[in-house]
Amino acid sequence: MMRGIAAVLAGLLSGALSGVGAYTFLYARGASYLTDNPAACANCHVMNDNYNAWERSSHRAVAVCNDCHTPHDFIGKYATKALNGYHHSMAFTLGGFHEPIAITPRNRAIAEAACRRCHGDIVQAIDRVHAGQNMTSCIRCHPSVGHLE
Amino acid sequence: MIARNQSPETQRKSLRGFVALLVAAALFSAVATFGVAALLVNIFEHKQEARNPFFRVVDLTDDTEDPAVWGKNFPLQYDAYLRTADMTRTRYGGSEAMPRTPTEADPRSVVAQSKLEEDPRLKTLWAGYAFAKDFREERGHAYMLEDQTYTERQQAAKQPGTCMHCHASVYVPYKKLGDGDIVKGFEKMNQMPYAEARELVTHPVTCIDCHDAQTMQLRITRPGFLEGIRAAKAAQGVSDYDPNVMATRQEMRSFVCGQCHVEYYFQGPEKRLVYPWTKGLKGDDILAYYEENGHKDWIHADTGASALKAQHPEFEMWSQGVHARSGVACADCHMPYKRVGALKISDHHIQSPVLHINNACQTCHKFPEEELKSRVETIQGRTMEMRDRVMDAVVALIGEIKAARAAGATETQLADACALQRKAQFLLDFVEAENSSGFHAPQEAARILLLALDYARQGQLVLR
């Protein structure tokens, strides 16, 4: 009898929690974050300007957000998504982040590597000279190719 | 677990353990559900704010002067606008709230610090002029009318109604006075004594001074600027220039500020406000204009020179700098875009960009705030060092002319030195009175100071 009541109670509790959790996940379009759709990155309006700028940039036809902002291997990509997802959702929910938002060193390195993934052949002569820690930064001189904001 | 063949003692114990486990599970579930529900509501709120609601609760017309009424439709902009009452110092500018005992003539209990007391050389520079009586650090827009009404300069000299052009919201009063024609209203008010004109105005600068009430588009409402820019463009070969029709939106984001933050003088007995721009916007261009028309602001008390006082030529100085050259408007740094919820609005708390470097500078300059601040202060520090040297030179020239006069030199003998004092003094003042301490155009400020220094030293040489 007791065991029955306990099982029902425990079931109700965990069911209610997972129900609210599932609804929140759907309402927040949680699954969209697992895709490559650039609109997902602007789900929360913080990225609106970046998204709008990307739509007008030279790279809009050849690269989406993930092409430049996540590594190109499966584990690296989803680990980066998880890490950024954690930082972004904490910042957006709790507030108090620095504006204008700025890229972190880790994410900058990922973007720089992405430039070279496509344009490596034509820049290897420059890169070879400055290889290592002081690698030449592409976006220092080409800040507008992805999105100037 | 509750086993059947146990003593009542053991049974009670395991029942207690079971209840404790159930309570712990319920607590855990409650906390977790509480957190998820809070997150859900937070997401809901963020989605709501992303809808950018605009509620038109009042109808604004071309006669709505009171900013509080505009504020009902635009509460975020209005809240920021009210904050121009804040007083904050920066390294080389800004204002500090100084307590004072209110009197019958001047009921202000707080004023900004006196620049005359900070630097007594200014009294020598402006001897015989009202500015030598009272000159304080400028406060925010909220105080423009109050500080103008109660400055001791009002007692030192008879001020005309022209002052209202930039110290009050005059668009609606000009329209009423001119029966619908702001230029006619402007001409009438210019000729009134200050006190009489003061009765006709109510607010410091308000929404309607820069915005069209129907479209919210930027609009020039000041006859002084309309006439000044038309004359300046005509001198460049552009006829009938009208900024309200011909300027781009980005140009308007500087022009509305240039309605007042400029060098000016009062022309003739009708006290018409004129911006002396037909020879160009540079300090020496403006000096050449005054040299040609012979205008003087006052006779210097120590030397008898026909002196000129430069007034806050921010628009002119900015126009010579790299930011203007790159298409950066006044509003980009002094009213930068800021995020309020999901809205991006321009910050109507107009203030020094140094007080919000992140929004003002970092949008373009991707460097840490401390680095950017130190760049600004380096430029300003160098300008102030040059300004100090030049001021010493001009004060020395004034001292020498005064001594020569006391020793019996005639007007004719002193004429050349006085003419050079006039030039040196104006150009020094052009940088001194400009409110960026050189930042708006560092190299141009240095060039103007160099000219001033040269004129001051030439003045000393002609006395030998």
Image: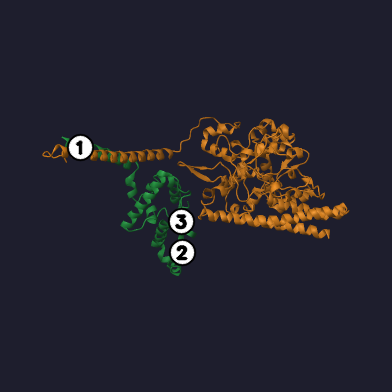
Chain colours: A green, B orange
Quadrant of residue B19 within the rendered picture = top left
Query: How far across and how far down the image is residue B230, in percent?
Result: 67, 45
Q: Looking at the rendering, in which quadrant would you find the N terminus of chain B?
A: top left
**Residue drawn 56% across the image and 31% down it:** B69
Residue position marked by numbered label 1 in the rendering:
A6
Report the Cα–Cα distance between label 2 and label 1.
64 Å
Residue position marked by numbered label 3 in the rendering:
A145
**Residue drawn 73% across the image and 44% down it:** B131
Relative to B204, is B78 on the left or the right?
Answer: left
**Within 10 Å of the Cα at label 3, are there few (<14), some (14-19), or many (20+) other Cα atoms?**
some
Work out whether residue B352 can be spotted: yes
User: Could you tell me the amino acid type at mark 1?
Assistant: Ala
**Within 10 Å of the Cα at label 2, are there few (<14), some (14-19), or many (20+) other Cα atoms?**
some
Report the Cα–Cα distance between label 2 and label 3.
16 Å
Q: Which mark is residue B306?
A: none
Residue position marked by numbered label 2 in the rendering:
A136
Work out whether residue B412 or residue B183 is closer to the camera in this orientation and state it.
Answer: B412
Report the Cα–Cα distance between label 1 and label 3.
60 Å
Mark 2 vs mark 1: in front: 1
Mark 2 vs mark 3: in front: 2
